[in-house]
Amino acid sequence: MNVRSGKTFHWLHFLLQKPETPRTRSQGPRSQAATDARTIAEPYSTRGDRLKRPMASVLVLGNYRQTLAVVRSLSAAGYAAIVGRSGERTPVECSRCVSEVWSHPPLAESTLDEFMTALDAFAADRPDVGLVFPIGDAEIPLIARAVDRLPKQIKPVIAAPDVVEKCLDKSITMQLAAELGVPQSRYEFAQDNEAVIAAAERVGLPCIVKAESEHGRVFGEKARIYASLADLESDFREATPPPHGFVVQHYFQGRRHNIYFFAQRGELKTCLQVRILRTDRSDDTGYAVDGESVKTTPALARHTAALVEGLSYNGAGCAQFLIDEATGAISFLEINSRLGANFAITRNCGMDLPHWFVKLTESPQADFAFPKAYKLGRRYAWTYGDLMGLKHALGRRELSIGGLVRRVTQVLTTFAMAHMHITWSWRDPLPTLHQYFAAVAKRLPLIRAK
């Protein structure tokens, strides 16, 4: 077998092999944690030897598409990115920018004590690990609440814990926006199903219903739009009340705009605006799959700066607004203490938020030389999400034949027109390949059964 075919076999074997089962911690917590880290990292040792030895290591928690952009940024900046895993193999682990994978207990409220014990043991054996970078809405608040329990050598790459909690609660950020004069469509908070119906009558139809907490969902969706009271009552009259409240807001017709920003001690230092062209849902309430960088709207920059100052924000984040492009009217949506799921576009435009955030955590008084301008007109595509959205629409029978043709045309057009793809990199192709191979492999048993 020649070298080329040997590499191909290795890639396919890695992509298709069955996920490893979590290891039993039968030894002492310290020795077993160290053994797990060394064992899981073993397949990467050859690749790691080829990389320049970094100055420090960063433990990255949470496996999402934005995690890829984080580890690629850290690797380019000279850090070793160690990715945590508490279950099946993930696409992120395939990245050439990941130096190790640490197998740990689930990072959840119910297993937080177990996770912290494992982290203490891991840190004791790894003095090179000085930072922990939680990525998603599941990991960030848990690390924020446990910040006093972190090993002494490890600093969390997050906004201040109280700011994290505020950003997760829409009632706090929306009230702050109102106090600061940031425009937003009229809204009310409702704590149960009957209150949602009453609130909808007061704010007016059409309306949009969202969970009060970032973790919540409305019948499995991020949000639901209701054009009539009868449709809303049909959903909420008999439904089991969820464990969270709702935001009922008058529907604002506009396109979503994300302001990715970096702040120090409550002062907005730099920002980049990205216009969302399309999401994975036909009503545009879902996850963005198509967007482009645009010139920053002065009003959005002012509103973001006001929110940053009001929160005494320190670090990277993302504020979201709607803009009626016909009238210029603006409505505030939310501000997040995490990097957006598709923030990889910002790196493509010259904005390196993960590296800056890590540098700020290491040196709170650090000075930054931010770019004077970012690349505009750069378009991105998240094709995997686009295809999953198409699958969702087909499963719910939302598309006519004509609608299906239009949707497929949109997917192909976005794919062809994009300057960059959210997870794909020619220099680091395995994560995206793993994701597609895994999706196909998951369907094969079902296809054979038919």
Image: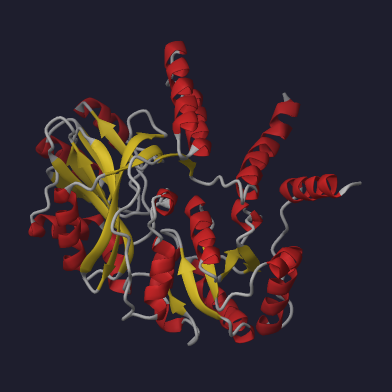
> Would you identify the image quadrant in which residue 432 lies?
top right
Is the residue 160 above or below the residue 183 in the image?
below
In this view of the protein, can residue 157 be seen by the observer?
Answer: no
Image quadrant containing the C terminus: top right
Q: Is residue 220 left or right of residue 428?
A: left
Residue in the image at 19% along x and 39% along y? 323
Residue in the image at 84% along x and 44% along y? 5
> Would you identify the image quadrant in which residue 157 lies?
bottom left
Q: Is residue 182 left or right of residue 431?
A: left
Q: Is residue 13 left or right of residue 419?
A: right
Residue in the image at 39% along x and 32% along y? 281
229, 424: nearer the viewer: 424
Is the residue 9 above or below the residue 350 in the image?
above
39, 242: nearer the viewer: 39
| Residue projecting furthest to the right | 1
In this view of the protein, can residue 272 be seen by the observer?
Answer: yes
Is the residue 235 above or below the residue 317 in the image?
above
| Residue projecting furthest to the top | 401
Residue in the image at 37% along x and 28% along y? 282
Task: Give the image location of residue 423, x and y in percent.
Answer: 53, 47
Task: Give the image location of residue 163, x and y in percent.
Answer: 28, 69
Task: Give the image location of residue 34, x and y in percent.
Answer: 69, 79
